[in-house]
Amino acid sequence: QAQLVESGGDLVQPGGSLRLSCAASGFNLDYYAVGWFRQAPGKEREGVSCVGARTDSSSDGTTYYADSMKGRFTISRDNAKNMVYLQMNSLKPEDTAVYYCTAVRGTPICDYVDADYRGQGTQVTVST
């Protein structure tokens, strides 16, 4: 059964770091734009970061970041493991949310609602 599974969420202090993982099984993430989205209690879901589908073996896809994440978060692919990571540094309490990864086939653009696959989410809590 094809699916995405996130992991790596945890409780971390402000200023700390976490690395979230998005693992795909049953399909090849190379052909998909993979995005990270998050939703905090009482707030709307928002896009965090996106890496476009790979167009050739020399490129991992164009990356995008929401303005508030630029310089703090880094999205990357591990093509051999069929995974995508979100490295999050300098975490702030406002980064607290459930983080979801999604996969959209054959596009440089990420999406949540129209994604081909969505994970179940992983909780990130930034607090003292």
Image (spheres, rainbow, N blue to C red):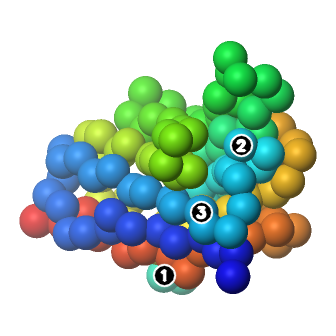
Give the residue displayed 42% in from the left and 73% down from the top.
122
Q: Quadrant of residue 25?
A: bottom right
Q: Upstream in the sequence, badge 1 or badge 3? A: 3
Q: Quadrant of residue 54?
A: top right
Mark 3, secondary structure of its residue: strand
Q: Quadrant of the C terminus?
A: bottom left
Type of the residue with mark 1 = Pro
Q: Which mark is residue 89?
A: none
Q: Is the C-beta separation of discs 1 and 2 under 8 Å?
A: no
Note whether 74 is above or below 119 in the view shown: above
Farthest top residue in view: 58
Other residues around mark 3 within 10 Å, as few (<14) / some (14–19) / many (≥20)? many
Give the Cα distance between marks 1 and 3: 27 Å
**Dot 1 corresponds to which residue?**
41
**Dot 2 corresponds to which residue?**
30
120 sits left or right of 14 in the view: right
Give the residue displayed 46% in from the left and 35% down from the top.
74
Mark 2, secondary structure of its residue: helix
Q: Position of residue 111 (x, y in %)?
A: 79, 58
Other residues around mark 1 within 10 Å, as few (<14) / some (14–19) / many (≥20)? few
